[in-house]
Image (tube, grey):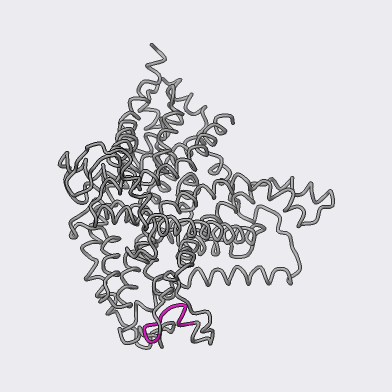
Amino acid sequence: MRRVRRWGPGLLLVSPSIVLIAIFVYGLIGWNVKVSLSNWRQAQPSYHYQGLQAYRDLNSDPVWWSFDVKHLVLFTVVFIVGTLIVGWSLAFLLDKGVRGEGFFRAVYLFPMAVSFIASGIVWRWLMNPAPGDRETGLNAIFDKLGLHVLANQWYLGQNWGMAAMAMPAIWALSGYVMALFLAGFRGVPEELREAARMDGASELRVYRHVVFPHLRPVTLAALIILGHISIKVFDLIVAIGGKQVITQVPAVYMWINIYDARDYAKGAAIATLLLVVISVLVVPYLVFTVRSERRV
Amino acid sequence: MSAASAARPLASPGRRRLHRRHASALVPKYLGLLLLAVIVLMPVYILVVTSFKGVAETDVSHAWSIPHAWTLDGWRAAWDALSPNLKNSVELVIPATLISTVLGSLNGFVLSKWRFPGSDLVFTFFLFGMFIPYQAIMIPLTQLFGDVHFPEGIPRLVFAHVVYGIPITALIFRNYYATIPNDLMEAARMDRAGMFRSYWSVVLPISMPAFVVAAIWQFTSIWNDFLFAVFIVTDPTKWPVTVALNNTAGSMVTTYNVQMAAALLASLPTLVVYILLGRYFMRGLMAGALKG
């Protein structure tokens, strides 16, 4: 009884949050799954069970596989690889300390403070595919510099458009990944580096055998973070490509299904699939980190 | 959290020995850093110069040059288009940030310093809520708001951001409070201080840094949010600035100078916070290494 008096108030204080999370995260997820299994395919809500019909429709929807999923895969690969490379390089360059490090860090990180809706406006200008006198941005400067061969369709390109679409995302997230890696680099005890140097290892070998292996947890964290951002990417695509099918991804298609087509079951099915894919990525990581924290 | 704790020692380079090398090795390093800084800042250059141009100068031949005649026309038009929505965003972000930081502080305190059986489980239960794609709750959420006749517009957004901000704010405060020595808490207990006394007189007075970090995080993500706003708020006069900005910029009749001025205008609050409190912003990112 005395022990309950000890921890009881704590539980009581957190319980409103527990209830809110239980209802608004877990409860609504369940509700959403129910919508995806219903025949709510018009503006009026309706919950008659129709099984996996919405998922089957999605599977046979020509837009789903050959646009949404294909776009998302290409975007994700380019975005993750690009952000890891740029972020890692920035951290590597800053690792040993440079003059004005604070300035560089602040510059690389600032895009995190800006919304994709706002930065999308300038990126749409930079990647404007319009020719001739409507030309702007990168194509305009390529022409000015006599590099017309480089001018291209950017995000409206037939096959590689989504790779261009990843550029603003790389721009936005590289600083974040830099900060993660920089912390990783600096988390390697100086004594370890020193010991390797004493053994006659060159600076290159110190990095390869001492520093890089230490970066694995950070790399994993960065992969998980970038991966889940990428899978649910929405604002950026809306800001730059709008609702066009040529830049469409699942999150945008979900929005279109609800706002334009009023097909709630199909929208809910897309949302459920997004959740499943992200859970597969995140849940093992969450369990792993909370467990390893407890061990400490 | 592995990432978060690995992230803590962002030691300044002064502490570590600088390995002096030949200048020839340093030149490419600084060149690389500068080049990347220029690339990162390029969109800002475009935003600023275009926003001060007249319409006549936004054509292809002047695309990258600075304005010949600086004008505020773009800014004026952007202000006219966005000022009601800026007001909405302010009315959204202030209460939502305040409520969620206070809630986060209380949750973080209990989850790290006044634990109960299963508190780690509760924490994990919260954390998952941080990673879910909000699309997966959006249809039921709008439906539920309608069913219970929740006041429309901004109040719905405040509520949503407070609820879905519970995980990240709990995480930030829990990580911070974990650094408070347990002896301090024991001492308070010896004095027979109850939970609220311990929180009020021991924990709260030293919580300022965590409040700043959590407030900046929430302020930035709520101000920049588009997803919740576009699904939840149907009345255009109640739109926060992100939705209005997307609408303005998406319209074909809006000229580039107005678009760029509008984008800058909508970003100013978060940019000012970043410039003034960048250090704390960084810490929030690190705590949120478990979040995107």
Percent x, y for residue A192? 74, 45
Residue A144 located left or right of residue A206: left
Residue sitting at x 70%, y 68%: B26
Residue span colored magenta: A132-141
Picture residue at 48% right of the left edge, 82% below the top: A141
Could you tell whether A36 is left or right of B13 in the image?
left
Q: Nearer the viewer, residue A44 or B95?
A: A44
Q: Nearer the viewer, residue A52 or B140?
A: A52
Residue B283 magenta-highlighted: no
Rendered view: B114 above or below B245? above
Measuring from the top left, give residue A156's x and y in whole percent. Answer: 41, 70
- Judged from this view, the residue extending furthest toward the front is A60
Number of dots carrying numbers: 0
State the residue at coordinates (53%, 87%): A146
Point 48% across, 41% down: residue: A280
What secondary structure characterizes most of the magenta part?
helix
User: Which of the 4 image quarters holds residue A31?
Assistant: top left
Please say whether residue B210 is visible from this viewpoint: yes
The answer to which of B261 and B180 lies nearer the viewer is B261
Residue A140 lies in the magenta-colored region: yes
The percent position of residue B112, horizontal first and vertical second, equals 46, 31
Q: Is residue B31 left or right of residue A155?
A: right
Q: Which residue is nearer to you in this view: A139 or B223?
A: A139
| Name of the residue lying farthest toward the top | A1
Would you say residue B268 is visible in this rendering?
A: no
Where is residue A45, by image quadrant?
top left
Q: Residue furthest right?
A: A200
Quadrant of the rendered structure where residue B273 is? bottom left
Q: Residue A76: x percent and y percent?
A: 49, 56
